Image (cartoon, rainbow, N blue to C red):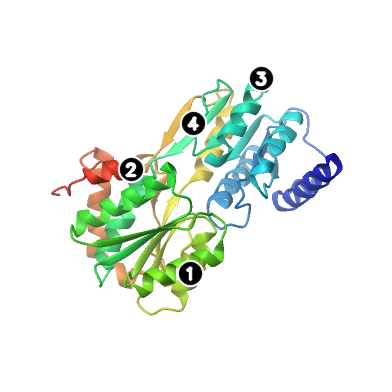
Protein backbone atom coordinates (compact mmCIF):
# COMPACT_ATOMS: atom_id res chain seq x y z
CA UNK A 1 0.00 0.00 0.00
CA UNK A 2 2.84 2.38 0.91
CA UNK A 3 4.58 1.74 -2.42
CA UNK A 4 1.38 2.39 -4.37
CA UNK A 5 0.78 5.64 -2.47
CA UNK A 6 4.38 6.74 -3.02
CA UNK A 7 4.18 5.96 -6.73
CA UNK A 8 0.95 7.94 -7.07
CA UNK A 9 2.47 10.84 -5.18
CA UNK A 10 5.58 10.92 -7.35
CA UNK A 11 3.46 10.79 -10.50
CA UNK A 12 1.50 13.74 -9.19
CA UNK A 13 4.69 15.67 -8.48
CA UNK A 14 6.08 15.02 -11.95
CA UNK A 15 2.85 16.11 -13.61
CA UNK A 16 2.62 19.25 -11.51
CA UNK A 17 6.27 20.16 -12.06
CA UNK A 18 5.81 19.95 -15.80
CA UNK A 19 2.88 22.35 -15.58
CA UNK A 20 4.34 24.75 -13.05
CA UNK A 21 7.79 25.01 -14.54
CA UNK A 22 9.59 23.60 -11.50
CA UNK A 23 11.23 20.96 -13.70
CA UNK A 24 13.68 23.66 -14.71
CA UNK A 25 15.03 23.92 -11.14
CA UNK A 26 16.77 21.48 -8.85
CA UNK A 27 15.19 23.22 -5.88
CA UNK A 28 14.65 26.65 -4.37
CA UNK A 29 17.62 28.93 -3.80
CA UNK A 30 18.51 30.02 -0.29
CA UNK A 31 16.13 32.77 0.82
CA UNK A 32 13.79 32.27 -2.15
CA UNK A 33 10.06 32.58 -1.53
CA UNK A 34 8.57 29.08 -1.78
CA UNK A 35 4.90 28.43 -2.53
CA UNK A 36 3.13 25.07 -2.66
CA UNK A 37 -0.39 24.36 -3.87
CA UNK A 38 -2.74 21.39 -3.62
CA UNK A 39 -5.56 21.41 -6.20
CA UNK A 40 -9.00 20.01 -5.65
CA UNK A 41 -10.19 17.08 -7.76
CA UNK A 42 -10.97 19.30 -10.75
CA UNK A 43 -7.23 19.72 -11.19
CA UNK A 44 -5.24 21.93 -13.51
CA UNK A 45 -6.78 22.27 -16.93
CA UNK A 46 -10.31 22.82 -15.63
CA UNK A 47 -10.26 26.27 -17.32
CA UNK A 48 -12.03 27.55 -14.23
CA UNK A 49 -11.31 27.47 -10.49
CA UNK A 50 -8.01 25.57 -10.21
CA UNK A 51 -6.54 27.26 -13.25
CA UNK A 52 -7.38 30.65 -11.77
CA UNK A 53 -5.55 29.75 -8.55
CA UNK A 54 -2.58 28.49 -10.55
CA UNK A 55 -2.35 31.81 -12.41
CA UNK A 56 -1.75 33.44 -9.04
CA UNK A 57 1.23 31.15 -8.50
CA UNK A 58 2.58 31.97 -11.97
CA UNK A 59 2.26 35.68 -11.21
CA UNK A 60 4.16 35.16 -7.95
CA UNK A 61 6.88 33.27 -9.79
CA UNK A 62 7.21 35.98 -12.43
CA UNK A 63 6.90 39.03 -10.18
CA UNK A 64 8.22 37.85 -6.82
CA UNK A 65 10.79 35.31 -7.99
CA UNK A 66 8.96 32.56 -6.12
CA UNK A 67 9.71 28.87 -6.42
CA UNK A 68 6.38 27.10 -6.92
CA UNK A 69 5.14 23.53 -6.77
CA UNK A 70 1.69 22.09 -7.45
CA UNK A 71 0.33 18.73 -6.34
CA UNK A 72 -2.84 17.60 -8.08
CA UNK A 73 -5.53 15.67 -6.24
CA UNK A 74 -7.22 12.91 -8.19
CA UNK A 75 -9.65 12.18 -5.36
CA UNK A 76 -10.46 13.48 -1.89
CA UNK A 77 -8.19 10.78 -0.48
CA UNK A 78 -5.22 12.70 -1.93
CA UNK A 79 -5.86 15.93 0.00
CA UNK A 80 -4.20 15.11 3.29
CA UNK A 81 -1.23 13.18 1.81
CA UNK A 82 -0.56 16.04 -0.61
CA UNK A 83 -0.77 18.66 2.15
CA UNK A 84 1.57 16.62 4.31
CA UNK A 85 4.01 16.12 1.43
CA UNK A 86 4.36 19.86 0.89
CA UNK A 87 4.50 20.46 4.64
CA UNK A 88 7.47 18.10 4.88
CA UNK A 89 9.24 20.28 2.29
CA UNK A 90 8.74 23.38 4.51
CA UNK A 91 7.28 25.72 1.91
CA UNK A 92 6.80 29.33 2.96
CA UNK A 93 3.09 29.12 2.13
CA UNK A 94 0.94 26.13 1.19
CA UNK A 95 -2.39 26.75 -0.53
CA UNK A 96 -5.35 24.38 -0.28
CA UNK A 97 -7.58 25.09 -3.27
CA UNK A 98 -11.21 24.47 -2.44
CA UNK A 99 -13.62 24.10 0.46
CA UNK A 100 -13.46 20.31 0.24
CA UNK A 101 -10.02 20.43 1.86
CA UNK A 102 -11.24 22.22 4.97
CA UNK A 103 -11.26 19.27 7.37
CA UNK A 104 -8.02 17.83 6.02
CA UNK A 105 -6.26 21.16 6.27
CA UNK A 106 -7.52 21.69 9.81
CA UNK A 107 -6.00 18.36 10.82
CA UNK A 108 -2.67 19.02 9.09
CA UNK A 109 -2.43 22.62 10.35
CA UNK A 110 -2.98 21.54 13.95
CA UNK A 111 -0.17 19.01 13.61
CA UNK A 112 2.22 21.61 12.14
CA UNK A 113 1.57 24.92 13.95
CA UNK A 114 4.72 26.60 12.59
CA UNK A 115 3.77 26.03 8.93
CA UNK A 116 1.72 28.70 7.14
CA UNK A 117 -1.28 27.65 5.06
CA UNK A 118 -4.02 29.36 3.07
CA UNK A 119 -7.33 27.92 1.94
CA UNK A 120 -9.67 29.16 -0.76
CA UNK A 121 -13.45 29.09 -0.23
CA UNK A 122 -13.46 27.84 3.35
CA UNK A 123 -12.80 29.13 6.84
CA UNK A 124 -10.38 27.06 8.89
CA UNK A 125 -10.06 28.55 12.35
CA UNK A 126 -6.41 27.83 13.07
CA UNK A 127 -3.86 30.59 13.78
CA UNK A 128 -1.53 29.39 11.02
CA UNK A 129 -4.24 29.33 8.34
CA UNK A 130 -5.30 32.27 6.18
CA UNK A 131 -8.90 31.71 5.08
CA UNK A 132 -9.94 33.35 1.82
CA UNK A 133 -13.57 33.58 0.77
CA UNK A 134 -15.43 35.61 -1.82
CA UNK A 135 -18.77 37.36 -2.16
CA UNK A 136 -19.79 35.22 -5.12
CA UNK A 137 -23.35 36.45 -4.73
CA UNK A 138 -22.26 39.94 -5.87
CA UNK A 139 -21.02 38.86 -9.29
CA UNK A 140 -23.78 36.27 -9.62
CA UNK A 141 -26.35 39.03 -9.08
CA UNK A 142 -24.88 40.89 -12.07
CA UNK A 143 -24.95 37.66 -14.10
CA UNK A 144 -28.61 37.13 -13.27
CA UNK A 145 -29.49 40.72 -14.12
CA UNK A 146 -27.79 40.41 -17.50
CA UNK A 147 -29.46 37.06 -18.18
CA UNK A 148 -32.89 38.57 -17.50
CA UNK A 149 -32.14 41.53 -19.78
CA UNK A 150 -31.02 39.36 -22.69
CA UNK A 151 -33.43 36.42 -22.36
CA UNK A 152 -36.21 36.36 -24.92
CA UNK A 153 -38.10 33.50 -23.27
CA UNK A 154 -38.18 35.00 -19.75
CA UNK A 155 -36.85 31.61 -18.67
CA UNK A 156 -33.26 31.03 -17.59
CA UNK A 157 -31.33 28.34 -15.74
CA UNK A 158 -28.67 27.73 -13.10
CA UNK A 159 -26.43 24.66 -13.15
CA UNK A 160 -24.45 23.94 -9.97
CA UNK A 161 -21.87 21.32 -9.11
CA UNK A 162 -22.67 20.13 -5.59
CA UNK A 163 -25.66 21.47 -3.66
CA UNK A 164 -23.69 23.05 -0.83
CA UNK A 165 -23.71 26.48 0.87
CA UNK A 166 -20.85 27.77 -1.29
CA UNK A 167 -22.64 27.09 -4.57
CA UNK A 168 -25.92 28.24 -3.05
CA UNK A 169 -24.36 31.72 -2.95
CA UNK A 170 -24.06 31.65 -6.75
CA UNK A 171 -27.61 30.35 -7.15
CA UNK A 172 -29.18 32.88 -4.77
CA UNK A 173 -27.32 35.86 -6.18
CA UNK A 174 -28.15 34.86 -9.76
CA UNK A 175 -31.84 34.36 -9.06
CA UNK A 176 -32.09 37.66 -7.19
CA UNK A 177 -30.32 39.55 -9.97
CA UNK A 178 -32.76 38.15 -12.51
CA UNK A 179 -35.70 39.16 -10.31
CA UNK A 180 -34.27 42.66 -9.99
CA UNK A 181 -34.88 43.02 -13.74
CA UNK A 182 -37.92 40.76 -14.21
CA UNK A 183 -39.76 39.76 -10.99
CA UNK A 184 -41.78 37.13 -12.87
CA UNK A 185 -38.87 35.42 -14.64
CA UNK A 186 -38.59 31.63 -14.36
CA UNK A 187 -35.25 30.34 -13.04
CA UNK A 188 -34.67 26.59 -13.33
CA UNK A 189 -32.09 25.14 -10.92
CA UNK A 190 -30.27 21.85 -11.35
CA UNK A 191 -27.25 20.28 -9.63
CA UNK A 192 -24.92 17.72 -11.15
CA UNK A 193 -23.66 16.33 -7.83
CA UNK A 194 -20.14 16.66 -9.22
CA UNK A 195 -17.55 19.23 -10.29
CA UNK A 196 -15.81 17.08 -12.89
CA UNK A 197 -18.52 15.21 -14.83
CA UNK A 198 -18.39 16.95 -18.21
CA UNK A 199 -20.98 14.60 -19.75
CA UNK A 200 -23.48 15.36 -16.98
CA UNK A 201 -23.03 19.08 -17.63
CA UNK A 202 -23.90 18.67 -21.28
CA UNK A 203 -26.90 16.47 -20.51
CA UNK A 204 -28.34 18.76 -17.82
CA UNK A 205 -27.81 21.88 -19.91
CA UNK A 206 -29.65 20.30 -22.84
CA UNK A 207 -32.52 19.36 -20.52
CA UNK A 208 -32.89 22.97 -19.42
CA UNK A 209 -32.53 24.32 -22.94
CA UNK A 210 -35.14 21.86 -24.21
CA UNK A 211 -37.47 22.99 -21.44
CA UNK A 212 -37.29 26.58 -22.62
CA UNK A 213 -34.39 28.20 -20.77
CA UNK A 214 -32.26 30.23 -23.17
CA UNK A 215 -29.44 31.28 -20.81
CA UNK A 216 -27.75 29.05 -18.21
CA UNK A 217 -25.28 30.17 -15.55
CA UNK A 218 -22.91 27.43 -14.46
CA UNK A 219 -21.04 27.18 -11.14
CA UNK A 220 -19.76 23.65 -11.48
CA UNK A 221 -16.10 23.39 -12.50
CA UNK A 222 -15.60 20.97 -15.40
CA UNK A 223 -19.34 20.25 -15.44
CA UNK A 224 -19.67 23.73 -16.92
CA UNK A 225 -17.47 22.73 -19.85
CA UNK A 226 -20.14 20.21 -20.80
CA UNK A 227 -22.79 22.91 -20.63
CA UNK A 228 -20.73 25.09 -22.96
CA UNK A 229 -20.54 22.17 -25.40
CA UNK A 230 -24.32 21.92 -25.30
CA UNK A 231 -24.73 25.62 -26.10
CA UNK A 232 -22.44 25.40 -29.13
CA UNK A 233 -25.01 23.32 -30.99
CA UNK A 234 -27.97 25.60 -30.26
CA UNK A 235 -29.15 28.83 -31.89
CA UNK A 236 -30.15 31.65 -29.55
CA UNK A 237 -29.04 29.90 -26.35
CA UNK A 238 -26.16 31.01 -24.14
CA UNK A 239 -24.02 29.96 -21.22
CA UNK A 240 -22.63 32.28 -18.56
CA UNK A 241 -19.21 30.99 -17.49
CA UNK A 242 -17.68 31.10 -14.05
CA UNK A 243 -14.47 31.68 -12.06
CA UNK A 244 -12.13 32.22 -15.05
CA UNK A 245 -12.83 34.09 -18.27
CA UNK A 246 -14.46 31.31 -20.32
CA UNK A 247 -15.77 33.58 -23.08
CA UNK A 248 -13.21 32.34 -25.59
CA UNK A 249 -14.12 28.67 -25.10
CA UNK A 250 -17.15 29.21 -27.34
CA UNK A 251 -17.00 32.73 -28.79
CA UNK A 252 -20.49 34.16 -29.12
CA UNK A 253 -22.08 31.35 -27.09
CA UNK A 254 -20.69 32.31 -23.69
CA UNK A 255 -22.60 35.52 -22.98
CA UNK A 256 -20.14 36.55 -20.26
CA UNK A 257 -18.27 34.93 -17.38
CA UNK A 258 -18.66 35.70 -13.71
CA UNK A 259 -14.97 35.98 -12.91
CA UNK A 260 -13.82 35.14 -9.41
CA UNK A 261 -10.21 36.26 -9.26
CA UNK A 262 -8.72 33.52 -7.14
CA UNK A 263 -5.41 34.41 -8.78
CA UNK A 264 -5.54 37.87 -7.20
CA UNK A 265 -6.09 36.39 -3.74
CA UNK A 266 -3.31 33.80 -4.19
CA UNK A 267 -0.87 36.47 -5.33
CA UNK A 268 -1.85 38.95 -2.59
CA UNK A 269 -1.16 36.33 0.08
CA UNK A 270 2.23 35.56 -1.48
CA UNK A 271 3.12 39.23 -1.82
CA UNK A 272 2.26 39.94 1.81
CA UNK A 273 4.42 37.01 2.89
CA UNK A 274 7.32 38.21 0.75
CA UNK A 275 6.98 41.67 2.24
CA UNK A 276 7.19 40.38 5.79
CA UNK A 277 3.60 41.25 6.71
CA UNK A 278 1.64 38.07 5.96
CA UNK A 279 -2.13 38.28 5.66
CA UNK A 280 -3.76 36.29 8.41
CA UNK A 281 -7.22 35.35 9.63
CA UNK A 282 -10.31 35.42 7.42
CA UNK A 283 -10.19 37.68 4.36
CA UNK A 284 -13.23 38.31 2.14
CA UNK A 285 -12.89 39.53 -1.45
CA UNK A 286 -15.83 41.04 -3.33
CA UNK A 287 -17.02 43.34 -6.06
CA UNK A 288 -15.60 46.48 -4.44
CA UNK A 289 -12.15 44.85 -4.24
CA UNK A 290 -12.10 44.13 -7.96
CA UNK A 291 -11.97 40.41 -7.23
CA UNK A 292 -15.47 39.64 -8.55
CA UNK A 293 -17.20 40.79 -11.71
CA UNK A 294 -18.30 40.10 -15.26
CA UNK A 295 -16.07 39.92 -18.32
CA UNK A 296 -16.20 42.61 -21.00
CA UNK A 297 -18.45 40.85 -23.56
CA UNK A 298 -15.63 40.59 -26.09
CA UNK A 299 -17.67 38.26 -28.33
CA UNK A 300 -21.23 39.24 -27.37
CA UNK A 301 -21.40 43.04 -27.53
CA UNK A 302 -24.14 42.78 -30.15
CA UNK A 303 -26.40 40.95 -27.69
CA UNK A 304 -25.65 43.14 -24.69
CA UNK A 305 -25.57 46.67 -26.11
CA UNK A 306 -24.72 49.97 -24.46
CA UNK A 307 -28.03 50.45 -22.64
CA UNK A 308 -27.79 47.12 -20.84
CA UNK A 309 -24.16 47.74 -19.97
CA UNK A 310 -25.12 51.10 -18.47
CA UNK A 311 -27.85 49.42 -16.44
CA UNK A 312 -25.37 46.82 -15.20
CA UNK A 313 -23.03 49.63 -14.15
CA UNK A 314 -25.85 51.19 -12.13
CA UNK A 315 -26.56 47.87 -10.42
CA UNK A 316 -22.87 47.35 -9.70
CA UNK A 317 -22.64 50.76 -8.03
CA UNK A 318 -25.71 49.94 -5.96
CA UNK A 319 -24.10 46.70 -4.74
CA UNK A 320 -20.83 48.43 -3.87
CA UNK A 321 -22.67 51.20 -1.99
CA UNK A 322 -24.83 48.70 -0.10
CA UNK A 323 -28.11 49.84 -1.62
CA UNK A 324 -28.49 46.34 -3.04
CA UNK A 325 -27.47 43.44 -0.81
CA UNK A 326 -27.39 40.27 -2.92
CA UNK A 327 -28.65 37.23 -0.98
CA UNK A 328 -26.15 34.48 -0.17
CA UNK A 329 -28.59 31.63 0.50
CA UNK A 330 -32.02 30.37 -0.51
CA UNK A 331 -33.37 31.58 2.83
CA UNK A 332 -32.08 35.09 2.13
CA UNK A 333 -33.38 34.89 -1.45
CA UNK A 334 -36.87 34.20 -0.14
CA UNK A 335 -36.86 37.61 1.51
CA UNK A 336 -35.25 39.53 -1.36
CA UNK A 337 -37.21 42.34 -2.96
CA UNK A 338 -36.14 44.24 -6.09
CA UNK A 339 -34.69 47.67 -5.38
CA UNK A 340 -35.83 50.81 -7.18
CA UNK A 341 -32.77 52.37 -8.84
Q: Is residue 50 visible?
A: yes
The number of numbered badges drawn on the structure is: 4
Name which quarter of the figure residue 136 lies in.
top left
Direction from residue 338 to residue 200 in the image, left or right: right
User: Residue 257's spot in the image, x, y percent?
Assistant: 42, 58
If you read the primary sequence from the N terminus, does the residue marked by circle 3 or circle 1 appear first? 3
User: Residue 27's spot in the image, x, y percent?
Assistant: 80, 38
Whether residue 26 is situated above or below residue 182 in the rendered picture:
above
If you read the primary sequence from the N terminus, does the residue marked by circle 2 or circle 4 appear first? 4
Whether residue 116 is situated above or below residue 2 in the rendered picture:
above
Residue at image coords 60%, 52%: 42
Residue carrying label 1 = 203
Residue carrying label 4 = 123
Q: Quadrant of the N terminus?
A: top right
Callout 4: 10 Å neighbours few (<14), some, many (20+)?
Answer: many
Q: Which mark is residue 114?
A: 3
What is the spatial separation of the Cα atoms under label 1 and label 2, in whole angstroms? 26 Å
What is the spatial separation of the Cα atoms under label 3 and label 2, in whole angstroms? 36 Å
Q: Which of the two discs, 3 and 4, sits closer to the camera?
A: 4
- Residues at marks 2 and 4 touching, judged by CB atoms closer than 8 Å: no
Q: Which mark is residue 305?
A: none
Amino acid sequence: MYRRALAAFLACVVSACALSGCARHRGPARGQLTLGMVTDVGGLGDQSFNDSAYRGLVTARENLGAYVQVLQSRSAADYQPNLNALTNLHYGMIYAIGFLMGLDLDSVAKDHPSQRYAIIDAVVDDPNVTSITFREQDGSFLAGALAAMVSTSHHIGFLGGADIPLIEKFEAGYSAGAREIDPSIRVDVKYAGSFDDVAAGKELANLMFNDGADIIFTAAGKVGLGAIEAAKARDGDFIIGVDSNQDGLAPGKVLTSMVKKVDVAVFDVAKSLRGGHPISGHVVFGLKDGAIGLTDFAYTKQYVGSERRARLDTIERAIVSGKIVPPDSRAALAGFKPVSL
